[in-house]
Image (tube, rainbow, N blue to C red):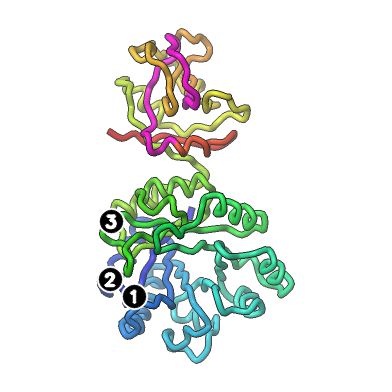
Amino acid sequence: MQTGISLYPGLDNTLEQNMELLKKAKNYGINRIFTSLHIPETNQTLFKKELRDLLLQAHILQLDVVCDVSPQACTLLGLKKLDPIELQKIGITTIRCDYGFSIDKIALFSTIMQVQLNASTLTHDTLTALQAANADFSHMDALHNFYPRPYTGLSERYFCSQNNYLREKGISVGAFIPSCSSGRRGPLYEGLPTLEAHRNISVSLAARHLTALDTDSIFIGDSYPTDEELSALTQTQKNVVVLKARLLSHDPFVRDFLSHSFTARQDPSRDAVRAQESRNLLHGHTIQPDATTILDKRLGDITIDNKDYKRYMGEVQIITTEQPSNERTNIAARIIPNELFLIKYITPGRQFRFEFIR
């Protein structure tokens, strides 16, 4: 999983704040930086003054700098022409080609440096034309747009359709999530998500949702995320669905037992997600019945079969359909309500794990 932050010199933050953010990103293990050369509200004088210092610092920290450019960016960059070698010299490692670039120019750039395509607008015809122009797809990935105005972000259905198509072509895909802190970027300060559903949810939940959707690279789009948000971003694990839950059991063994990563069985149950390896993790421990056996089971309950279920003792399930109480099954924990939607992404063979909160 690749992770990134966004910098906007000449906008909300001072140079010192952006320098500090670069260092924090490196310390948290974040490896990519996004910036744009065509945001209308940018103070152009400050931008020109600060950009080179930020690019140099990013180069020293060995961060991948993704720069969203247009062919008119030469003046801002102080270049005579938009040349891939010159872009690399000033510290831009990946150029995000959006409007104004011809197919031939994108193909040429891809033979020299990393090129990023716009995942939100990319079409079959464009990819076909790039293939015909001998573009080097080993130097390409794709990144979705972010959407500053509320109610303009992408739907999950369209997002997944684009991603599935790009992955079929061997192209990895990234997306943006917003900060929910005071560090949101102007001029609207309404968050910078790719998916509209993420506009007002935490970095942790948005990032885990994108991970569940098999996104390869996740950027915080806003200007100045908190340390907590940076930490949450870097804790996401590719291909693992992570769900937050509240523990009901008071048995220390159960907490440790449920802290393992599990794999959903290949033969999916109608009424639950079943962990295929859980029974083998008991290592001689006996699961005793507890007081929760008298409770009916509801969506999001995390259950463990106790010793009265004989050879099924230790089976972990996430309940997906309401079930009556069963003296042979303990309810060990419950997924918190706003995370129940993540259960549907635990498809057969998919890894999942729980994070327990108070």
Labelled pair 1, 3 in contact (Cβ < 8 Å): no
* Residue 3 pos. (x, y %): 44, 57
- Viewer-closest of 202 and 21: 202
Name the kind of residue labelled 1 in the image: Pro
Whether residue 182 sits left or right of residue 123 in the image: it is left
Q: Farthest front residue? A: 151
* Residue 166 pos. (x, y %): 62, 58
Q: Quadrant of residue 31?
A: bottom left
The residue indicated by pointer 3 is 181
Circle 3 Cα neighbour tier, 10 Å, few/some/many (<14 / 14–19 / ≥20): some
Name the mark on residue 9. 1
Q: Looking at the picture, does residue 297 appear above or below residue 10?
A: above
Circle 2 Cα neighbour tier, 10 Å, few/some/many (<14 / 14–19 / ≥20): some
- Magenta range: 317-340
Measured Cα–Cα span from mark 2 to mark 1: 7 Å
Tell me the quadrant of the picture where the C terminus can be found.
top left
Q: Looking at the picture, does residue 6 appear above or below residue 277?
A: below
* Element type where label 2 sits in the image: loop
* Element type where label 3 sits in the image: loop
Name the mark on residue 13. 2
Labelled pair 2, 1 in contact (Cβ < 8 Å): yes
Measured Cα–Cα span from mark 2 to mark 3: 14 Å
Measured Cα–Cα span from mark 1 to mark 3: 19 Å
* Residue 101 pos. (x, y %): 59, 78
Residue at the spot x=62%, y=27% of the render? Answer: 267
Name the kind of residue labelled 3 in the image: Ser
Inspect the magenta stretch and tell me whether residue 3 lies in it: no
